Structures are given as C-alpha cells and as structure tokens.
Amino acid sequence: MHIHIFMHVPFEGPGCIIDWINSRAHEVTYTHWYRHPTPPAATDFDFLVVMGGPMGIHDESEYPWLAVEKAIIRQAIHDQKPVLGICLGAQLIAHVLGANVYANEQKEIGWYPVQFSPSSPVKGLPQEMRVFHWHGDTFDLPAGAAGFAASAATPNQAFVYKEKVIALQFHFEVTQESLDSMVQHGEEELVAAPYVQDRGLIQDLAEFIPENNELMYGVLDYLTAE
C-alpha cells in the first residue's frame, strides 16, 4: 500500500505511524507543505494521513496551499480511500465535510483523559485513558459522521465517516522524540490555564506513550483492513 503523509510544520511528524508503516512493509511518501512542494494528485496514493500544525484551517491568506490541500483531502474521501487526520488534520477533514471549525472555549495542551464510546469502530479502545493534546480549535461533527471520543474540554475528540475516514483531535502517534519537539517549538503556549500543563508535567506523563502508540496501530490496522 502507498501511504502519503501531509506535514504542515517540521516538528509535527508522523511519530509511531512510521514504525507501523515499516512493520507492514508499506511504501510512504510525503508532502511538506511548509516547503511549497508540488502536491500529489489523489490518484498518487492509496491512504492519506494528514498531520497537525499550529495554523488554522481558515488561514488560507497566510498559507495559500491550504486550499490545494483541502481539495486533495476532499477528493481522497470522495474516492473512498482511507484518510486519517490528526489535530489540524482532523479539523481539515471536518471542514471539507461541511462542519464548522472554530476556537474552542479552552486550549487543551498536555495529557488529559478522553472517554471512548463503546460504539467506536476501532476495537480495543478503553473506556477512558490519558492521551496527548495540543489544540486550541475544535469542530462540530460533520453530517453522517459518528463521534466516538470526548474530553472535559472538548466534546468532539474523534469521529469516523463512512468507515474509512477517521479524525482524531489528539495525538496517539506521539513518541518521546516528537513530544520533545512539539514542546520545544510551542513552549510559549504553556501558560497557566485550566487545561494546559507545564513542560515538566508533560514530560513526566510521557509514560503513557507506549499505550497511546498501541492504540494508534489499532486505528491504522482498522483503516487498512480488507
């Protein structure tokens, strides 16, 4: 399978998704939007992964490539390809499916619990667990989508659309390396707030990374199952 990854900044990469790709012997290619590359056609890949970034989905005047990216995501969904969006990627999926994306009442940064619905399409998700968050925006559920995760700060944390499209507002994919990179580049956002942890606590709670990664593999296996 040819998996294509959209990256918006160099410090929010695919994390453990690369380990999963290598273990399944899939092919992987990238579009690094921040380098202004030639974008792929939706026919160039079998599975699209859309990563996070600090920009918003409405920031096309500053990041004109967002319009191109949205068109490719929309086409991949139309072509019934597996699509996974994480954080900004989840917001982009919600947007192209017609849902509102807007500033959340609270920023959510750090390791906070998420509750998973028993009706989740991904098997093996616990009733509740700590996952890593770094977002200030949120989304409404698109028409036809089924939400399956929520937190105290963010009611819509994840949804599935037509079985092969999954949007995750949080970061199952985070590794120690990618966690360190996100904290380093976003430390100015770690200010006292109800759902913002400091750098020390974020690092102390990195013990949850292996469990998060195991669930990321479950999501990817679900999306690529025949």
Image (cartoon, rainbow, N blue to C red):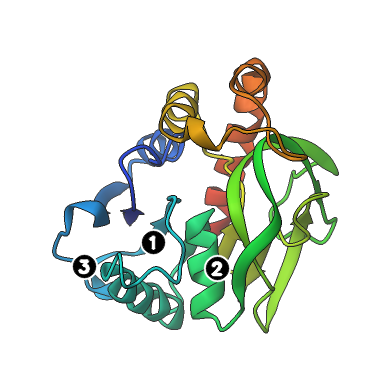
Number of residues whose C-alpha sits closer than 10 Å to that of mark 3, classed few (under 14), some (14–19) or many (20 or more): some
Is residue 164 at least partly visible in the picture?
yes
What separation in Å lies between label 1 and label 2 (alpha carbons)? 11 Å
Is residue 32 at least partly visible in the picture?
no
Q: Left or right of 77: which side holds 143?
A: right
- For residue 164, which numbered disc appears in the image? 2
Q: Amino acid at mark 3?
A: Pro
Q: Secondary structure at mark 3?
A: loop
Q: Position of residue 37 (x, y in %)?
A: 15, 59
- For residue 48, which numbered disc appears in the image? 1
Choose the circle earlier in sequence order: 1 or 2. 1
Q: Left or right of 145: which side holds 80?
A: left
Q: Which residue is mark 3?
A: 40
What separation in Å lies between label 3 and label 2 (alpha carbons)? 20 Å
Q: Position of residue 111 (x, y in %)?
A: 69, 32
What separation in Å lies between label 1 and label 3 (alpha carbons)? 11 Å
Q: Secondary structure at mark 2?
A: loop
* Quarter assignment of residue 145: bottom right
